[in-house]
Amino acid sequence: MGNLLQDLRYGWRMLITHRGATVIAVVTLALGIGANTAIFSVVNTVLLRPLPYHDSNRLVMLSTNEESNGALGNTGYATFVDWRERSRSFERMIVIRSWGGVLTGQGGPEAIRGLRVTRGGRTRICNWSCALPATPAR
């Protein structure tokens, strides 16, 4: 125990005599702890917490890949209908497609982006609120 106290006193003396190195060490630790906290907050929110829907662990996304570069693409409606007719594993299926347009009116034109979601009417296809009964958290 005596060696520990002696080491702590020696470390304290070194911190006081080398103030520049002390400031650099403290700032480096503060930045490291802050960055670690921020990264964990994002990972926790995006990956670790469940989605704000009932039975969110049962949600899946089916997609097609573009042949040229392998990127996710919009699935055609005919492909969706084929999937829906052949599916025995899914309770409900909806189509969500990206959509974009230009909003004009007061001021200059503004590009907008959104999603197209299928409507109800068939037994195995329903709208967004039917497939996800809870409203998404904002």
Image (cartoon, rainbow, N blue to C red):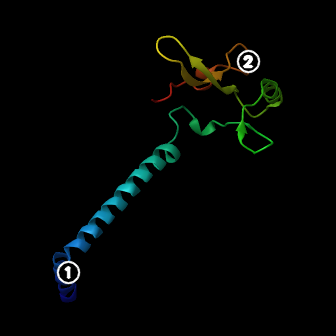
The residue depicted at 67 percent of the width and 27 percent of the height is: 97
Instruction: Please tell me whether residue 79 is drawn above or below residue 10 in the rendered image.
Output: above
- Quickly name the residue at label 2: 123
Locate the N terminus by quadrant: bottom left
Give the left or right position of residue 94, taking residue 110 as reference.
Answer: right
Q: Position of residue 102 (x, y in %)?
A: 59, 19
Instruction: Please tell me whether residue 82 is drawn above or below residue 36 in the rendered image.
Output: above
Tell me the quarter of the picture where residue 118 sits: top right
Tell me the quarter of the picture where residue 111 sits: top right
**Which residue of the protein is positioned furthest toward the front in this rendering?**
108
- For label 2, count other residues whose C-alpha is less than 10 Å away and answer few (under 14), some (14-19) or many (20+): few
Instruction: Please tell me whether residue 48 is drawn above or below residue 92 in the rendered image.
Output: below
- Total marks in image: 2
Locate the C terminus by quadrant: top left
Tell me the quarter of the picture where residue 34 sits: bottom left
Q: Position of residue 5 (x, y in %)?
A: 18, 83
The residue depicted at 44 percent of the width and 52 percent of the height is: 39
Mark linked to residue 132: none
> Mark 2 or mark 1, which is nearer the start of the sequence?
1
The residue depicted at 16 percent of the width and 80 percent of the height is: 13
Instruction: Please tell me whether residue 20 is drawn above or below residue 132 in the rendered image.
Output: below
- Quickly name the residue at label 1: 14
Q: Position of residue 64 (x, y in %)?
A: 76, 37
In three-dimensional space, the C-alpha distance between marks 1 and 2, rounded to whole angstroms, equals 75 Å
Amino acid bearing label 2: Thr
- Indicate the secondary structure of the residue bearing disc 2: loop
